[in-house]
Image: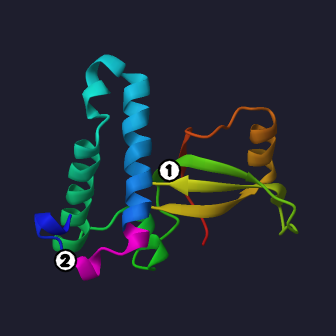
Amino acid sequence: MIEANCVSSRLTAAWVQNHYSLIVWKIACLIRSYPDHFMDQWQSKSVLNQLLYRYEREVNLGQRPVLRKILEQDDNSVKHMVLFVANIIKTQSSSFYNTSTKYRLVLSDGWYKVRSCIDLRMEHAITRNRLKIGHKLSICGAQI
């Protein structure tokens, strides 16, 4: 990426690792859904091009995805957004009012991830295998 004139001080290891993992996830999902059309994307050149695209959008153009805006408190978390379930974590932590004690979700907008608490209805969906990793959620009225 530095050979493509990216500023090295803006390329932290955490930024590259985060975006690399989500780009590989995206390409794998595309190939799984449409293998005949996207199989040629399964190469390092495609991942690098996506990393450069994200660098251009975030660093050079200053455009931020929804989760980054919310986490930096530049946007409201109650607005409508579509996130996907990146992971379901089984926990033994103490519960908060009307929240699950068994599970936490890792949600993503495709660019960043955030851990979340869930309510008892969502826990029920997980235990009945109705909510799985990769499923999309239409979220409105979320709290930080």
Residue 39 percent across, percent down from the top left: 31, 25
**Residue 91 quadrant:** bottom right
Q: Give the residue pinned by disc 2.
A: 7
Q: Distance between the residues labelled 2 and 1?
A: 30 Å
Disc 1: CA contacts within 10 A as few (<14), some (14-19) or many (>=20): many
In the rendered image, which quarter contains the C terminus?
bottom right
Residue 19 percent across, percent down from the top left: 38, 58
Disc 1 marks a residue whose amino acid type is Leu
**Residue 2 quadrant:** bottom left
Q: Which of 142 and 54 is in front in this view?
A: 54
- Which tag, 2 or 1, sits closer to the chain's start? 2
Residue 22 percent across, percent down from the top left: 43, 51
Please state if 42 lies on the left or on the right of 107 as rendered: left
Secondary structure of the residue carrying tag 2 is loop
Residue 38 percent across, percent down from the top left: 29, 27
Magenta residues, dominant SS class? helix
Residue at the spot 38% in from the left edge and 55% down from the top edge: 20
Q: Cβ–Cβ below 8 Å for labels 2 and 1?
A: no
Disc 2: CA contacts within 10 A as few (<14), some (14-19) or many (>=20): few
Please state if 4 lies on the left or on the right of 104 as rendered: left
State yes or no: residue 10 in magenta: yes
**Residue 27 quadrant:** top left
Is residue 110 at least partly visible in the picture? no
Secondary structure of the residue carrying tag 1 is strand
54 over 28 or under it: above or below: below
Q: Which of 17 and 112 is in front in this view?
A: 17
Q: Give the range drawn in magenta.
A: 8-15
Q: Give the residue pinned by disc 1.
A: 83
Q: Which mark is residue 108?
A: none
Looking at the image, the residue that sits furthest to the top is 36
Disc 2 marks a residue whose amino acid type is Val
In the rendered image, which quarter contains the N terminus?
bottom left
